[in-house]
Amino acid sequence: MAAREQHSTVVSWLMRLVGKEHWSAVLFALRINIFSLALLGFWTPLNNLMLPDQVSQLVPEFLKGSALGLITFLGIGIATIVQPIAGRIDDRIALPHRRKAFIAGGSAAGVLGVLLFSLAPAFIWLLLAYIVMQIAVNVAQAAFQALIPDLIKPDGRGLASGIKDGLGVLGAALGVVGVGLLVNLLWGKYLALAYLALLLGGTAYLSLRWVPDVPPPPDDERIHNLRDIQVAAMFRSFAAAFKANRVFRLAVVARFLFLLGLYPVERLFLYYLENRFHVTSLSHVSVFLVAAI
């Protein structure tokens, strides 16, 4: 009874904080943005803990920084290409449940990529696994990013976007804490990667359950088969849209500059702590990352 009363008190406090008239909008935004937990929850510990550790085990010590830079460069480059193409196809594909189909398919392929990542016997296999994960998860992310404009009216998109980013930060913390607790156990590396795969697959499943179907595109905009996909025409339309929309152009440039400063620091953080402070335990490094988050 005490626990139930405490839960009721918390809910009442949240309703007063948010406002009763906005409570249903908050719950709806939480449901459609649940996959946001997986994105940072998956990539933050994978990129900043598991990937540097795997690279250091598969390449000589004097090459680990260069190898990590190479795999990161290729992964981000592939993501830059895959996500807008997947998003355009998902916008126009003549499939039922089109957004959810991309989220489900991309997440399932991402889980297979995690399996390959965990078993990689050499750097080339690790690189292949990372590319598979980048392609798969970015296909899912492309569809997920469209849910707010698809399902939320313009006057509610600020609230929904704030909830989406809040869930992302919470997911990053959950991912790093989970990996930090698991890596020192027996078979810890495999348990940590299984945890990340479960986080990705579990939130994808909840998206399939909770996200409403998105109406199909108009007949004259639909892609009915793979022959209708013209990558060159897509990129010409991307360039035209980028040129015509000044605010969007500035937002992309600002985002690029922000991530340009952030990504190199994150990727090499583990190696810096190892070389400067002789911190070699992933669980100890995860404490620094949680504090940053």
Image (spheres, helix red, strand yellow):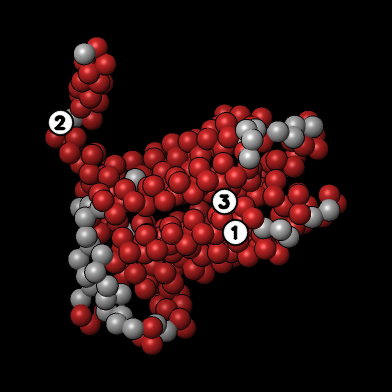
Q: Which residue is mark 1?
A: 116
Q: Is residue 19 above or below residue 133?
A: above
Residue, far front = 186
Give the quarter of the figure containing the N terminus.
Answer: top left
> Looking at this view, is 259 or 82 the one in front?
82
Q: Are marks 1 and 3 in contact (CB under 8 Å)?
A: no
Tag 3's secondary structure?
helix
Q: Residue at x 42, y 78 (%)?
A: 234
| Amino acid type for the residue under numbered disc 2 | Lys
Q: Which mark is residue 157?
A: none
Residue 5's x, y, as percent? 21, 15
Question: CA–CA distance between discs 3 and 2?
Answer: 37 Å
Q: Residue 135 appears at what percent x and percent y?
A: 51, 65
Who comes first in sequence, dot 3 or dot 2? 2
Q: Residue at x 33, y 41 (%)?
A: 163
Residue at the spot of label 3: 259
Q: Is residue 87 above or below residue 179?
A: below
Residue receiving disc 2: 20
Front residue of this view, candidates 2 and 237: 2
Comparing labels 3 and 2, the label whose residue is closer to the camera? 2
Nearer the observer, disc 1 or disc 2?
1
Q: Residue 199's x, y, as percent?
A: 44, 45
Which quadrant holds residue 125?
A: bottom right
Kind of element beneath mark 1: helix
Residue 36: x and y, percent? 40, 47
Left or right: where does residue 198 sit relative to residue 126? left
Q: Which image quadrant is residue 100 in?
A: bottom left
